[in-house]
Amino acid sequence: MGQIKVTPCGIEGLYIIEPTVHGDSRGYFMETYSQRDMRENGLDMVFVQDNQSMSRKGVLRGLHFQINHPQGKLVRAIRGTVFDVAVDLRAGSSTFGRWFGVILSEENKKQFYVSEGFAHGYLVLSDVAEFCYKTTDFYHPGDEGGLAWNDPAVGVVWPGVTGTYRGSASAEGFVLQDGTPLQLNARDQGWPNLSEAVRF
């Protein structure tokens, strides 16, 4: 039992992981994490902390990274739907500044592994979403860094988001297709663009 499908994402260090789901008329069962299966697919990271958050539609969290204690993250949505994004911030990387995004939902049950050296964030597309992730290092207060979610130099295409870039990470005037305002906390609206961000 177990067995996972691991798909590289075109940027080294990013992988989509799909578990085997065993379902019948009663419901389903799946292994959400197996160290053995990960190692058999060449992924030998060790996780030390689990986190969970709940967010409402239009909430955008990110793009975040840890400065002195970079974390690898294995992320998934256990309720609702999110668009999850990683941006390469590794100095010397041939894909520096490139991004990759994937829909994670309770229906598709996909997981996304984001290695150390990436900025990470997600946008909630459903009315409510619950988001879980494992990390390869502990949380260290004061070690947070960030990248502007809407930096034109990166060019993340957030599904259904419209608005006019005004030179900062402000969410003012940005909405989803149904008119839901984009919601970012004050810190996430103050992150710098790629040219000023930390490189790993």
Image (cartoon, rainbow, N blue to C red):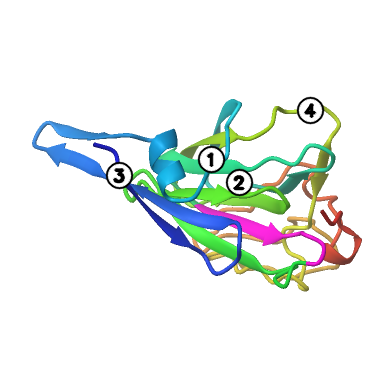
Q: Is 86 colored magenta in this rendering?
A: yes
Q: Disc 4 or 3, which lies upstream in sequence? A: 3
Residue drawn where x is 61% and y is 26% of the image:
48
Q: Secondary structure at mark 1?
A: strand
Residue drawn where x is 47% and y is 40% of the image:
129
Q: Disc 1 or 3, which lies upstream in sequence? A: 3
Q: Secondary structure at mark 4?
A: loop
Mark 2 is surrounded, within 10 Å at the Cα level, by few (under 14), some (14 to 19) or many (20 or more) other residues, namely many
Q: Indicate the amino acid at tag 1.
A: Arg
Q: CA distance from mark 2 to mark 3?
A: 33 Å
Q: CA distance from mark 4 to mark 3?
A: 33 Å
Percent position of residue 117, x then y: 73, 52
**Location of residue 12 by image quarter:** bottom right
Q: Indicate the amino acid at tag 4.
A: His
Which residue is the site of mark 3? 3
Which residue is the site of mark 2? 59
Magenta span: 83-92
Which residue is the site of mark 1? 56
Using the image, determine if residue 29 lies above or below residue 86.
Answer: above
Q: Secondary structure at mark 3?
A: loop
Between 100 and 136, the residue placed more toward the observer is 136
Percent position of residue 73, x then y: 60, 42
**Closer to viewer: mark 4 or mark 2:** 4
Which residue is the site of mark 4? 140
Q: Indicate the amino acid at tag 3.
A: Gln
Q: Is 55 colored magenta in this rendering?
A: no
**Closer to viewer: mark 2 or mark 3:** 3
- In the figure, is residue 127 to the left or right of 92? left
